[in-house]
Image (spheres, rainbow, N blue to C red):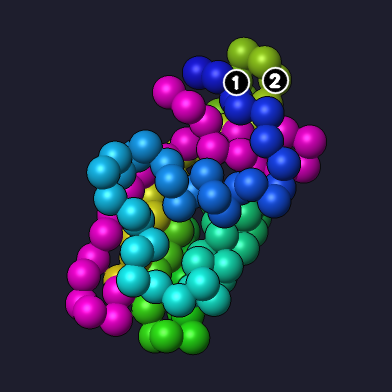
Amino acid sequence: MRIPSITTATLAALIISSSANAGTEFYDGLHSDAVRSATAVIQNALETLPSGQRADWVGRDLGFGYVKPIRTWKSVTGHYCRSFEERVYTVAGQMRRRQLTACRVNGTWRLVED
């Protein structure tokens, strides 16, 4: 596992373009407000929720979703890491699901490249 060197500002872009759902835009069809809500909830959920509990979000366009931490561990580099599930429900009635891994580096949860 390699933890990419990124800033907090690029976290949303990484989440949106993650290869976990290669070939699709995970947040496609949602208002940018919904995407901002989702990324804020992801950071907060990874920081505060025990594994198995979920945090919901609702966008201004009525798209909604949740993030649920699955597992927590300490990496060989000493960073705390978590796998988590994310689901998005679009206004058009589509459900999208993916599972990702993030590690806490310098106070920010960052997606990990497998």
What's the residue at 61%, 48% (across, down)?
Answer: 11
- Relative to 40, residue 74 above or below: above
Magenta highlight: main SS? strand
59 lies above or below 28: below
Q: Position of residue 52 (x, y in %)?
A: 43, 52
Q: Position of residue 88 (x, y in %)?
A: 34, 65
Q: Are marks 2 and 1 in contact (CB under 8 Å)?
A: yes
The one of 64 and 8 positioned closer to us in this rendering: 8
Left or right placement of residue 35 versus residue 96 in this view: right
Q: Can residue 9 be seen in this view?
A: yes
| SS label for mark 2 | loop
Cα–Cα gap, marks 2 and 1:
5 Å
Identify the residue under disc 1.
Answer: 75
Indicate yes or no whether the magenta region holds residue 103. Answer: yes
Left of 80 or right of it: where is 25? left
From the viewer's side, name the closer residue of 25 and 85: 25
Q: Which amino acid does label 1 sit on?
A: Ser
Q: What element carries label 1?
A: loop
Which residue is identified by label 2? 78
Task: Please say whether residue 110 is one of the residues in the magenta stretch.
Answer: yes
Most distant residue in the left direction:
93
Q: Quadrant of residue 89?
A: bottom left
- The 10 Å Cα crowd at callout 2, few under 14, some 14 to 19, many 20 or more, is few
Please provide the residue range marked out in magenta. 90-114
Residue at 68 percent of width and 36 percent of height: 6
Residue 52, above or below 33? above
Front residue (pair 103, 14)? 14
Residue 28, percent from left and from top: 34, 64
